[in-house]
Amino acid sequence: MSELIRNELAKRLREQGKLTFAEFMSIALYHPTAGYYNRQAMTIGPGGDFYTSPMVHPIFGACVARQVWQMWNLLGKPDPFFVLEMGAGVGTLAVDFLQMAERDAAFFAAVRYQIVEQGAVLSERQRAAAAERGYLGKIKWYQTLDEVPGKQVGVIFSNELFDALPVHRLGKREAGFVEYYIVEDGAGYREVEGALSDPALLELIDATTQELLQVGERLEVCPAAGAVIEQMGSLLETGFVLTIDYGNLAPDVYLRHRKGTGVRAFWKQKLVDPLERVGEQDLTADVDFSLLVRRGERAGLFEVGFTDQMHFLGGNGFLHKVAELQNRSRQQFDLMADEELHKMLSLFMPQSLGEVFKVLIQAKGMEPAAIEGKLGALTFTLDE
């Protein structure tokens, strides 16, 4: 743990006595210079603490681009066309998206690609990736959603954004719900139980989940997720919000982790204790997609469909590329094609990432009948 992180936590604990887990997680991940996502040594990808789907194979970014291209067509091919990526990691998805977009000259010309990235280290890595592929002048960066102009016509999308937003850890007791706080424990930290930091946290939990949870069981709630999806929706006059992340609908998303496993920490691609190596390991929690649906409605977003990554990729041309590689491998005994095929299938197969990651599509300012059956992500079947 860096001294900056240790000192910031010590200062907050002196002032407050205890921290919500959301405060602890926010410092650990987003401290301006020492947080996990903002430190110079931050490691994502091969040899790092975790990797994302865009890093596995460029087909992921190509499929996202194809889905957004369909949305552009449904919107009447507007020019300019607003495309906003939230939290672009190291920039892999952005450059793969733009490379695919170039296949349609009119679409590529219309796209105004924007990125919201909170940290300087990541935004510099994104700029470097874009410059290497010749797309630096095609992308505009913002540090926060507040900076992005509203009344847009287009698409806002994210991949593994919501799972990294700070969560509160709650538990059910006979008398109601309690919250778990972080306090110092010698040179480290531990949890203590206390009253809710804000009674409004219970409003984030659907009634079915509250009823099904048993005394002694736990869950995590994310106020920031609701605020972010509302803000996304408010930026759009007409268009779509596409969210790819791991989690599920309620109550399943909560019941799966009711024994206290909802927050996970990754260090060198291994599960570790969330209270150790603060600022040096990733912290993450499953996304409640039902909350995104409910809160999105406040900003005029309506749910178009909910599926998984396998169906999303399958409906956007994934299997055509697989067939090409299979033919190449058979005809030429191409070991490189075999390796590439293996990477691609890890994105698709249910026992790998294909079922773990879920996809939520929301729309605003459109008639539902105009969308039904016209988005690849929602039309794929395994019989194809």
Image (cartoon, rainbow, N blue to C red):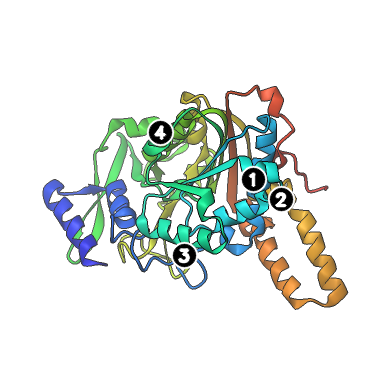
**Label 3 CA crowd tier, 10 Å (few <14, some 14–19, many 20+):** some
Instruction: State the SS at label 1.
Output: helix
Instruction: Quickly name the residue at label 2.
Output: 103
Instruction: Quickly name the residue at label 3.
Output: 44
- Measured as percent of width and height from the top left, residue 208 is found at 49, 31
How far is mark 1 from mark 2, CA to CA? Answer: 8 Å
Q: Reading the chain from its start, which is encountered first: label 4 or label 1?
A: 1
How far is mark 4 from mark 1, CA to CA? Answer: 39 Å
Of badges 4 and 1, the one in the foreground is 1
Q: Reading the chain from its start, which is encountered first: label 4 or label 2?
A: 2
Q: Is residue 248 left or right of residue 258?
A: right
Instruction: State the SS at label 4.
Output: helix
Specify the amino acid type for callout 3: Ile
Q: Quadrant of residue 35?
A: bottom left
Specify the amino acid type for callout 4: Leu
Specify the amino acid type for callout 1: Phe
- Measured as percent of width and height from the top left, residue 31 is found at 28, 55
Instruction: Quickly name the residue at label 4.
Output: 204
How far is mark 3 from mark 2, CA to CA? Answer: 29 Å
Point 38% across, 38% down: residue = 147
Point 20% across, 66% down: residue = 3
Do residues under tags 4 and 1 come within 8 Å of each other at their CB atoms?
no
Do residues under tags 1 and 2 come within 8 Å of each other at their CB atoms?
yes
- Measured as percent of width and height from the top left, residue 304 is found at 63, 31
